[in-house]
Amino acid sequence: MNNTITTTNRTNNLIQVRVPAGLKERTSKLFESLGTSTSDVIRMMLIKADETKSIPFQVRTGAYPITANERIEEIKATFALEGMPLSEQNIQDLIDIELAKTTTEEVRQRILKEIKEEQEKA
C-alpha cells in the first residue's frame, strides 16, 4: 500500500477590475458584514460560472422595463395606499439611490439615527 500524497503546484492569477468611485468601498463593507471579502465573492462567482458554464446571475439587455421616475412614482403610490406618504427627503433619497449617490443601507442608517434622536427628544 502506497501512502504517498501527490499535490499539484497551483498558481494564482491576478485579476484587476476598474469600478465606479465609491462602489468598491460600499461593497467591501457589505461583504465584510457578511463575513467575506471582495476577492472571495469574485472567486465564488468565477467558481460558480465554471461549474454551471453560465453567468451565475440574471443578465438583461437594455434598460429596466420602467424608468427610474416610474419606479419612484410606483413606490410613492404604494406608500400612499398604505397611508404613509413619502416626504420630500424620502423622495430625494430614492433619487439619490437611483443615481448611485448613496446606498439603501446609508439611507437606512440615517433614518434610524433620526428616529433615535426624535425619541430622545420626547
Image: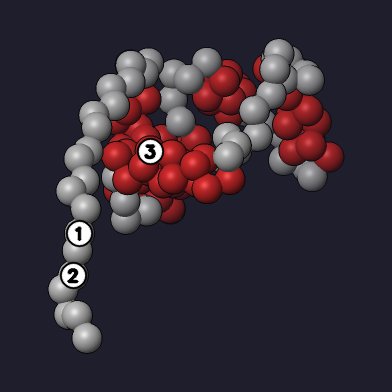
Q: Residue at x 78, y 20 (%)?
A: 65
Q: Earlier in the sequence, mark 3 or mark 1?
A: 1
Disc number for residue 5: 2
Q: From this viewpoint, is residue 60 visible?
A: yes
Please state the horizontal and vertical placement of residue 117, each as a whole percent of the image: 37, 46
Q: Which residue is the site of mark 3?
A: 42
- The residue under label 1 is which amino acid type? Thr
Q: CA distance from mark 3 to mark 1?
A: 25 Å
The reply to whether callout 2 and callout 1 are in contact (CB within 8 Å) is yes
For the residues labelled 3 and 1, say whether their Cβ atoms are less than 8 Å apart: no
Residue at image position (78%, 28%) is 74
- Numbered disc 2: secondary structure: loop
Which residue, as the protein is rendered here, is positioned at the far front?
A: 1
Residue underneath mark 1: 7
Q: Nearer the viewer, residue 62 or 56?
A: 56
Q: Vertically, is 99 above or below 84?
A: above
Q: Can you tell which of label 3 and label 2 is closer to the viewer?
A: 2
Of residues 49 and 74, the one nearer the viewer is 49
For marks 3 and 2, the one nearer the N-term is 2
> Hey, what amino acid is under mark 2?
Ile
Res. 88 mark: none
SS for tag 3? helix
Query: Would residue 120 be found to the left or right of residue 11 on screen?
Result: right
Q: CA distance from mark 2 to mark 1?
A: 7 Å
* CA distance separating discs 3 and 2: 30 Å
> Tag 3: residue type?
Ile
Local packing at callout 3 (Cα closer than 10 Å; few below 14, some 14-19, many 20+) is few
